[in-house]
Each structure stands twice: as structure tokens, then as C-alpha cells.
Image (tube, grey):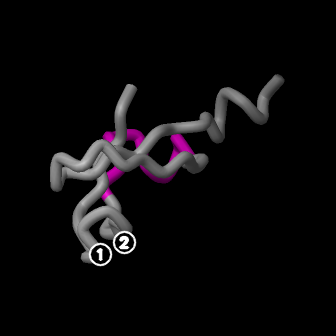
Amino acid sequence: MARNEIRPIVKLKSTAGTGYTYVTRKNRRNDPDRLVLRKFDPKIRRHVEFKEER
């Protein structure tokens, strides 16, 4: 289906090394590169960058 091609499911992994991940969808047309978001990591109780895994 077109939905899966345009907005795939991606895993965001913490750069703090805790192994914590978020699962989200991204729009490939607006964000063709790997996604980097600043989100909360509950294992270290801080906001850190989360990078897209493939």
C-alpha cells in the first residue's frame, strides 16, 4: 500500500547508550535523511538525542 511507502515505521535509539528506543512513523518526502529527535530517556532521566535505526 502507499501508506507504508510514504510513512514507514522507524526505530529511534538513544545516543546515551542505554539501549532505550522509541517507535514512530516518518514522512519520507519531508525527511529523506535519517531522523534525529531530542526526546526523554527514562533510564537516565534526561533529554537526549535519538537517532533513526534501519
Residue 38 left/right relative to 24:
left
Which span is picked out in magenta?
27-36
Which quadrant holds the C terminus?
Answer: top left
Residue at 37%, 68% in the rendered image: 42
Q: Which residue is mark 1?
A: 45
**Residue 45, position in %: x, y?**
29, 75
Q: Nearer the viewer, residue 40 or 52?
A: 40
Which quadrant holds the N terminus?
Answer: top right
The secondary structure type at the circle numbered 2 is strand
Q: Is residue 41 magenta?
A: no
Characterize the magenta stretch by its predominant secondary structure. loop
Residue at 40%, 40% in the rendered image: 32
Amino acid type of the residue that numbered disc 1 sits on in the rendered structure: Arg
Q: Are marks 2 and 1 in contact (CB under 8 Å)?
A: yes
Q: Is residue 22 above or below residue 41?
A: above
Query: Label 1 neighbourhood size at 10 Å, few (<14), some (14-19), many (20+)?
Result: few
Query: Label 2 neighbourhood size at 10 Å, few (<14), some (14-19), many (20+)?
Result: some
Residue 54 left/right relative to 3:
left
Q: Which residue is mark 2?
A: 40
Total marks drawn?
2
Residue 48 left/right relative to 29:
left
Is label 2 or label 1 in front? 1
